[in-house]
Every structure is written in structure tokens, then in C-alpha cells.
């Protein structure tokens, strides 16, 4: 089975609770939709947990806009103001400083912009309508919102599973499934079992952002 997990944003306890609800076997695949860090209180614990999890299960780690901002700032010194405007302070505090974050750069650098499986495409933000997957701009893959969400059949023949844009409940249409249900805003953390489109959810702590 394949499970896709929505935006975590440093909410370690919710992540742990959600994974405990999933009937996982060793053969199952876990796809994480990006935005593991920022805003929530436990970004370091989330990353350490995911690294350990990947030793026991096949895991795909997508890159979200928050991982993109982190990499730009920590590696290149760019976009730092943008990153801190979007919740970096809690991440730096969780890791114990920027130098500690550098120790985890291999994890962030190895995240991928998209993952394709059968007739599904998994991506953090969405896709630019009418552009092939191979020709997508990475900026769109992690940042796009309305242009993608309100489009019709943006990747013909594919169902796009995405995070990034929070919904009160999973967004489901014939061509898209959105599974960010606003954990960091006091909503839920959601996982989708792709084969039968069953959702698993846990309630998150009070609004933190």
C-alpha cells in the first residue's frame, strides 16, 4: 500500500500519533508531502523521526516551499527574511541554532520536487496547468496555489496529490486530492491511502500559528 502524509510543520506528536494509526507493513510506501519544518515547535524531532523511519520503510520525501526557503538561507544566505517571515524562528530554536541545521542538510538536499506512481503525481504545491511534468518550474511545484487548484485537468491523465494549501477537510476532485488539513493551524494531520482513497486523521494541538 501507498500512504501520502500531509504538511507536518514541526508537529511531532501529531505525526507520531498519525503513523501509529496507519496499518503499516514492511512493504508499504510512505510519501511525505513536504513542509516538515517551521511554525510548529518540534522541527528537529520531526526530521530525526523521519530519518529513522526511512531506515525501516520505503519513504519518499517531497520538497515543500519551507524546505526550499531553509536551503536557500542556510546554504546560500538568500531568502532569509522570507524564511523567517514564514516561521523559521521556531525551527532554528528547535535545532539549537543554524549550525545544527547544517548537520541535516543531506536530508533536505535529497528531497524531491515530485514523485510519479502509476496515474498519480505527488507534489507539494501543485503544477502549472498545461505544462508537462518534465517542464515544470520548481518554483511552481512548491509555491503554486489558486492557478492550479481552480484549473481543470492540469496534468491530463494524472491525478495530482498535493499539500501546501490547507483545507478543513481533504480536497477531492476527479483530477486532484489535497491533503493539507491545517495541522499547524489547529486542524488535523491527514494521511491518504492511495489504493482505496481512505483517509486517516489525527487532531492537532491548539493553533500554533
Image: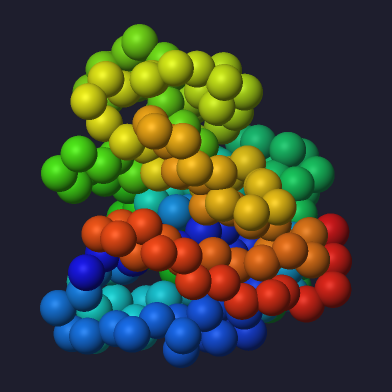
- In the picture provided, is 89 more to the left or to the right than 99? right
**Quadrant in the picture for residue 136:** top left
- In the picture provided, is 153 more to the left or to the right than 56? right
On screen, 166 above or below 209?
Answer: above
**Quadrant in the picture for residue 116:** top left
Q: Residue at x 36, y 57 (%)?
A: 197
Q: Nearer the viewer, residue 194 or 13?
A: 194
Farthest residue toward the top? 130
Q: Residue at x 31, y 22 (%)?
A: 155
Visible in this render: residue 98?
no
Find residue 21 and report its horizontal and vertical position in percent.
46, 85
- In the picture provided, is 109 more to the left or to the right than 75? left
On screen, 143 above or below 112?
Answer: above
Q: Residue at x 25, y 59 (%)?
A: 195
- In the picture provided, is 190 more to the left or to the right than 59? right
Quadrant of image for the C terminus = bottom right
Find residue 140 and report its horizontal and vertical position in percent.
48, 25
Which scheme is used to colour this image of the protein? Answer: rainbow
**Quadrant in the picture for residue 185:** bottom right
On screen, 68 above or below 149?
Answer: below
Q: Residue at x 57, y 21 (%)?
A: 150
Find residue 20 and report its horizontal and vertical position in percent.
46, 89
Q: How many marks?
A: 0
Quadrant of image for the N terminus = bottom left
Visible in this render: residue 134?
yes
Find residue 84 and report its horizontal and vertical position in percent.
76, 49
On screen, 206 above or below 139?
Answer: below
Amino acid at each position: 500500500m501507498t500512504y501520502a502524509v500531509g504538511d507536518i510543520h514541526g508537529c511531532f506528536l501529531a505525526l507520531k500519533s498519525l503513523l501509529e494509526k496507519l496499518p503499516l507493513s514492511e512493504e508499504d510506501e510512505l510519501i511525505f508531502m513536504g513542509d516538515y519544518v517551521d511554525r510548529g515547535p518540534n522541527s528537529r524531532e520531526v526530521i530525526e523521526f523521519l530519518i529513522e523511519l526511512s531506515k525501516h520503510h520505503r519513504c519518499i520525501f517531497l520538497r515543500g516551499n519551507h524546505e526550499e526557503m531553509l536551503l536557500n538561507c542556510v546554504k546560500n544566505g538568500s531568502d532569509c527574511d522570507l524564511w523567517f517571515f514564514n516561521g523559521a524562528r521556531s525551527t532554528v530554536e528547535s535545532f539549537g541554532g543554524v549550525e545544527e541545521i547544517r548537520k541535516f542538510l543531506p536530508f533536505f538536499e535529497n528531497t524531491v520536487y515530485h514523485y510519479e506512481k502509476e496515474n498519480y503525481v505527488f507534489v507539494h504545491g501543485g503544477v502549472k496547468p498545461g505544462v508537462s511534468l518534465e517542464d515544470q518550474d520548481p518554483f511552481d511545484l512548491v509555491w503554486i496555489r489558486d492557478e492550479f487548484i481552480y484549473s481543470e485537468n492540469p496534468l491530463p491523465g494524472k491525478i495530482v496529490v498535493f499539500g501546501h494549501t490547507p483545507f478543513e477537510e481533504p480536497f477531492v476532485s476527479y483530477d486532484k486530492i489535497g491533503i493539507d488539513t491545517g495541522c499547524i493551524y489547529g486542524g488535523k494531520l491527514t494521511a491518504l491511502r492511495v489504493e482505496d482513497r481512505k483517509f486517516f486523521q489525527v487532531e492537532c494541538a491548539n493553533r500554533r500559528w
